[in-house]
Image (cartoon, helix red, strand yellow):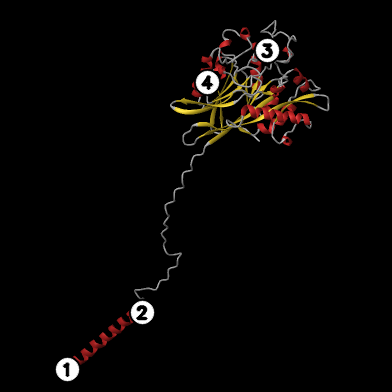
Amino acid sequence: MKKSLLIITLCVLFVLAIFVTAFALQLLSAPSSKQDVSVSATTMPTVSVTAEPTPSPTPSPTDCVATFGFVGDILMMKSQIATAKKDDGTYDFTRSFEPMRELFSSVDVMVGNFEGTFGGEEYAYTQNIGDPRPPTPDNPNPSSPFQEFSSPDELAENLRELGFDVLTTANNHSLDRDIGGLYRTIETIKNAGILRTGTFLSQEDRETPLIIDINGIKVGIVCATDSINGYNDRLSSTERDYAVARLYQNPEFFAKDISACREGGAEFIIACVHWGDEYENVQDSTQERTARELIEYGVDAIVGSHPHVVQPIKWIQATRDGEEISVPVIYSLGNFISNMSPDLTHYGLFLSMELTKNAQTQKVSVTELKYLPVYCLRQSLSTGERLHQTLPCYSDISRITPFEELSSKEERNIEKCREHILKVCGTDNAKIMD
């Protein structure tokens, strides 16, 4: 019995030993529960953290700047027209203006006063006082105590090519070829690609303001004259209300012209006025009073013509809408080109007016006013011609480029022109260009 029990015990122990051995071997062959894993940067999940962008500072608004240039009376007389005539019968006035080209290109908008008409060849170009001229459909018996001006159409094209952007046309010679000539003048200027104001084709035309948007500044230009040489009878009662803007005869209409500019969006208004006494070097009390009235109407700058000589430059202080304003008044630019005889009528101004619109307030003001004397030279050429040329009067005469070399006398005349204009205009109210 004991022997049997021993055998059974030994068997159990043997089986148990086998089981333990197998279990141990299974444990030794099993992988470790803590594996050695190498994780590369490419396989590691990454979290991309994008920093909030630093907001760029809002650009500060910048001021808008525009420059306007002005010259005085453009008068084409008989001898000037004769010199401009070419062999083929056409006309070219380029030589008379070429020395001013560079100066004109220095401004954004160029303005001049065209004193005369483009009446058409059939009604005669400018003649001397007393010379008969052919009748027009509007005037079968033309006669006048004044010289009457009419230029070839090529002049308009030459002025545009030189750089004129605007011509003002309200002056005492607007009706020199009657109402038909006035209308034809407007059309000729338009066809040449030049803007104009002062004379009009209709009431609707009169009520459409001239507003120029230049470099972000909207500038209105108005024009009126104090005289039409007594030619009221060349206008019908209806035409008197719109054809020529009058400074004194119907000032309420001119006030409406100014208001129309403002209502049309103009931020700055320039009045080009034909006023004053001829050949007077100083403005009169009527000009001074009218200047203040125009400022009350809403004008921001005043540029004058008609005296044929240069008059002073002033600033008028006024109050508008509760604010103090300062308005430049150029009483007379003198002549730009003509064949007038008195020495002082050979002198004129090139005026440069800089306008700035403040980016913060949106107010437009004159930030620089400067001028350069100009001289109308009657030069006897080697060809035998006598050429009228407008020259910029720089202090350095070598900068001036006339058609032919200047004589010592001509140089002295240019110096006299500069000296006279500096005396009249000074440098307190406007800078001298050089």
Amino acid tagged 1: Lys
Q: Which residue is at a point 51% across and 19% down the rendered structure image?
A: 293
Tag 4, which secondary structure?
Answer: helix
Residue type at mark 3?
Arg
Q: Is residue 391 above or below residue 306?
A: below
Residue occupied by mark 4: 294
How far apart are labels 2 and 3 at the CA level?
124 Å
Q: Of label 3 and label 4, which has the lower sequence position?
A: 3
Q: Position of residue 312 (x, y in %)?
A: 60, 25
Q: Check disc 4 and give the amino acid type.
A: Leu
- On residue 177, the disc is 3
Task: Say whether marks 4 and 2 touch (CB < 8 Å).
Answer: no
Residue 7 visible in the current orientation:
yes
Residue reaching furthest to the bottom: 3
- The Cα atoms of the two marked residues, 4 and 2, are separated by 111 Å
Structural distance between the alpha carbons of marks 2 and 1: 41 Å
* Secondary structure found at label 2: helix
- Quadrant position of the C terminus in the picture: top right
Which mark's residue is nearer the viewer, 2 or 3?
3
Counting residues from the N terminus, which is met first, the one under dot 2 or under dot 1?
1
Please name which of the two marks, 1 or 3, marks the residue nearer to the observer.
3
The residue furthest left is: 1
Q: What residue is disc 1 on? A: 2
Question: Which one is nearer the viewer's eye here, 26 or 72?
Answer: 72
Residue 278 found in image quarter = top right
* Residue 425 in the image, given as x and y percentages of width and height: 62, 28
Q: Do the residues under discs 2 and 3 have CB atoms within 8 angstroms?
A: no
Q: Amino acid at mark 2?
A: Ser
